[in-house]
């Protein structure tokens, strides 16, 4: 019996996800609950001093993250 391999072409176009902090579409980052934070914002937040004006901006953006309720 002759078996022919069918060519399967799967094209996956991933544009990325919207970062909750900078609100731009980025490809790499972390998920916190159901929210995405891009690598650049994560790096900036970690390195930002609490006296920096950007710190308040990051806090404001992070307040958008909600803890999903567990349904049982």
Image (cartoon, helix red, strand yellow):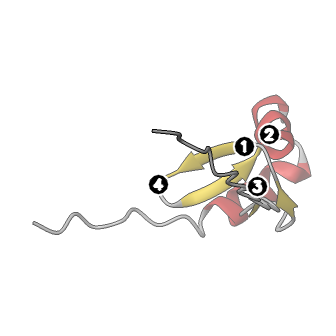
Q: Is residue 33 left or right of residue 49?
A: left
Check if mark 2's residue and mark 4's residue have beta carbons within 8 Å. no
How far is mark 2 from mark 3, CA to CA?
14 Å
Residue 39 badge: 2
Element under label 4?
Answer: loop
Mark 3 or 1, closer to the camera: 1
Quarter of the image where one finds residue 23:
bottom right
How far is mark 3 from mark 4, CA to CA?
17 Å
In depth, the one of 31 and 41 nearer the eye is: 31
Element under label 2?
Answer: helix
Q: Earlier in the sequence, mark 2 or mark 3?
A: 2
Residue 25 image point, x, y percent: 84, 63
Q: Which residue is mark 1?
A: 29
Check if mark 1's residue and mark 2's residue have beta carbons within 8 Å. yes
Q: Earlier in the sequence, mark 2 or mark 4?
A: 4
How far is mark 3 from mark 1, CA to CA?
16 Å
Q: Which residue is mark 4?
A: 33
Q: Which residue is mark 3?
A: 58
Q: Earlier in the sequence, mark 3 or mark 4?
A: 4
Residue 4 image point, x, y percent: 60, 45
Q: Image point 88% across, 52% down: which residue?
A: 54
């Amino acid at each position: 019996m002759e078996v022919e391999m069918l060519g399967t072409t799967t094209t996956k176009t991933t544009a990325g996800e919207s970062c909750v902090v900078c609100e731009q579409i980025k490809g790499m980052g972390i998920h916190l609950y159901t929210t995405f934070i891009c690598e650049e914002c994560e790096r900036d937040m970690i390195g930002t001093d609490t006296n920096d004006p950007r710190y308040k901006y990051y806090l404001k953006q992070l307040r958008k993250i909600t803890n999903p309720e567990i349904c049982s």
